[in-house]
């Protein structure tokens, strides 16, 4: 009996349950830390992605579709697009709540789009769940993210296409809207002399002057082009000037692809004086064939039924083209002195000076209007060596995240 009792007092069979209980508690706490903390960081990355995408979408909308500055935070197109894109990016299998504002961070000036994404139980959002936290009395966790993108004005593109139209001018003389500033022809006074009396004026856009071709007035403008010699026929808004771009490509190559040579505002480009009209038309038709189903909505001033973005980032029929200084072209062709400082060509061969770069949707070469297209905005880049215009005069758009 004594030995049996002594053995019972020394028994350790139940001690393992205490150790298992402690281990389970520790393991549970470890799971809470690893799994729930991991869930929070996955959601945090998803929330940041949603904020980044929403901010960039809003910045793009401010560049191409919504020109108010600033837009309404509730009802504007930019705000709706920013919220929609942010909400489409789920944060742990559920849409977060995006809040849009158009405030720039301290020290930043420009057209900013800010998105705050909530998945923390505030701003009408649902907090994140926990997987193991409820066992320790922790039922939710909180995540939020913020991003700011800015919409800037570009001044260059590596994909300029080889056609140009005259930048608009102040019409003082000709009721047919022909640019007339210098005497042309053989009769006195000498060709290149300023016209007496009323004459047309032109001033290029600057950082403080929007110019005569502005986004607010001319976005969607229809240009019915004319394929006539730019060296002999009157300079009109419709006169299409073919260009000889750098890089050695043919006119057709440069119409259907990207030349890859960056051209910027104030650059000079030679005029292609050898291209014939049927080759211009054929090249334009080749571009139209790249997105044959695309059309233009005159009411909304938008491209519809495009193959983009599956075939390209924008419709292949939306191409960047140059606007040129009509004053310099007329002076050069009337005087024959293309190297005149007021003309500015690098050699004594015809050239144009780029005063703006603009998106041009090739709508068609036939139909009720004849060959025509529309002015639109286009993605661009920024060179520090080229001028940058004020918002209403700038047709190239760049966007990037700043926070």
Image (spheres, rainbow, N blue to C red):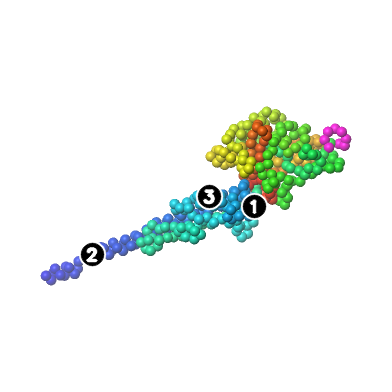
Picture layout, residue 116 above or below residue 276: below
- Determine the CA span between mark 2 and mark 3: 59 Å
- 203 relative to 99 in the view: left or right: right
Magenta stretch bounds = 183-190
- Determine the CA span between mark 3 and mark 1: 20 Å
> What number is the disc on residue 14?
2
- Determine the CA span between mark 1 and mark 2: 76 Å
Picture layout, residue 64 above or below residue 230: below
Q: Nearer the viewer, residue 195 or 261?
A: 195
101 inside magenta stretch: no
> What number is the disc on residue 101?
none
Q: Quadrant of the N terminus?
A: bottom left
Q: Nearer the viewer, residue 60 or 341?
A: 60
Q: Position of residue 94 (x, y in %)?
A: 45, 53
Q: Nearer the viewer, residue 230 or 367?
A: 367
Mark 1 highlights which residue?
Answer: 68
**Residue 4 visible to an observer of this rendering:** yes
| Mark closer to the observer (2, 3) | 3
Q: Of the residues under marks 1 and 2, which one precedes in the sequence? A: 2
Q: Position of residue 174 (x, y in %)?
A: 80, 39
Q: Position of residue 219 (x, y in %)?
A: 67, 44
Residue at position x 49%, y 60% from top?
122
- 299 relative to 310 in the view: left or right: right
Q: Quadrant of residue 263?
A: top right
Q: Of the residues under marks 2 and 3, which one precedes in the sequence? A: 2
Q: Residues within 10 Å of mark 2 (few under 14, many from 20)?
A: few
Main secondary structure found in the magenta portion: loop
Q: Residues within 10 Å of mark 1 (few under 14, many from 20)?
A: few
The kind of secondary structure element at disc 1 is loop
Residue at position x 19%, y 68% from top?
10
Mark 3 highlights which residue?
Answer: 85
Q: Quadrant of the C terminus?
A: bottom right
């Amino acid at each position: 009996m004594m030995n049996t009792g002594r053995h019972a007092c020394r028994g350790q069979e139940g001690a393992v349950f205490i150790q298992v209980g402690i281990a389970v508690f520790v393991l549970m706490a470890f799971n809470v830390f690893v799994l729930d903390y991991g869930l929070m960081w996955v959601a945090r990355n998803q929330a940041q992605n949603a904020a980044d995408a929403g901010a960039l979408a809003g910045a793009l909308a401010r560049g191409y579709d919504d020109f108010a500055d600033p837009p309404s935070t509730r009802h504007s197109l930019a705000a709706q697009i920013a919220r929609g894109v942010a909400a489409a990016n789920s944060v742990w299998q559920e849409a977060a709540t995006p809040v849009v504002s158009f405030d720039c961070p301290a020290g930043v000036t420009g057209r900013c789009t800010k998105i705050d994404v909530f998945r923390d139980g505030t701003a009408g959002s649902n907090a994140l769940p926990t997987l193991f936290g409820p066992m320790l009395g922790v039922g939710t966790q909180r995540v939020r993210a913020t991003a700011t993108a800015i919409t800037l004005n570009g001044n260059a593109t590596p994909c300029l296409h080889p056609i140009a139209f005259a930048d608009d001018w102040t019409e003082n003389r000709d009721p047919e809207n022909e640019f007339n500033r210098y005497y042309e022809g053989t009769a006195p006074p000498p060709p290149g002399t300023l016209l007496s009396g009323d004459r047309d004026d032109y001033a290029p856009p600057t950082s403080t002057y929007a110019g005569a071709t502005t986004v607010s007035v001319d976005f969607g403008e229809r240009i019915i082009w004319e394929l006539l010699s730019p060296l002999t026929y009157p300079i009109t808004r419709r006169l299409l000037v073919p260009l000889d771009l750098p890089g050695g490509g043919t006119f057709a190559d440069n119409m259907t692809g990207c030349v890859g040579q960056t051209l910027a505002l104030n650059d000079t480009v030679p005029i292609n004086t050898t291209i014939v009209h049927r080759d211009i038309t054929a090249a334009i038709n080749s571009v139209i064939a790249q997105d044959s189903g695309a059309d233009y909505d005159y009411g909304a001033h938008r491209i519809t039924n495009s193959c983009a973005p599956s075939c390209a980032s924008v419709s292949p029929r939306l191409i960047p083209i140059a606007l040129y200084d009509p004053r310099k072209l007329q002076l050069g062709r009337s005087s024959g002195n293309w190297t005149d400082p007021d003309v500015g060509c690098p050699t004594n061969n015809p050239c144009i000076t780029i005063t703006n770069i603009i998106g041009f949707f090739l709508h068609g070469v036939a139909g009720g209007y004849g060959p025509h297209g529309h002015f639109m905005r286009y993605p661009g880049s920024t060179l520090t060596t080229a001028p940058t215009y004020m918002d209403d005069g700038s047709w190239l758009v760049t966007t990037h995240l700043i926070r």
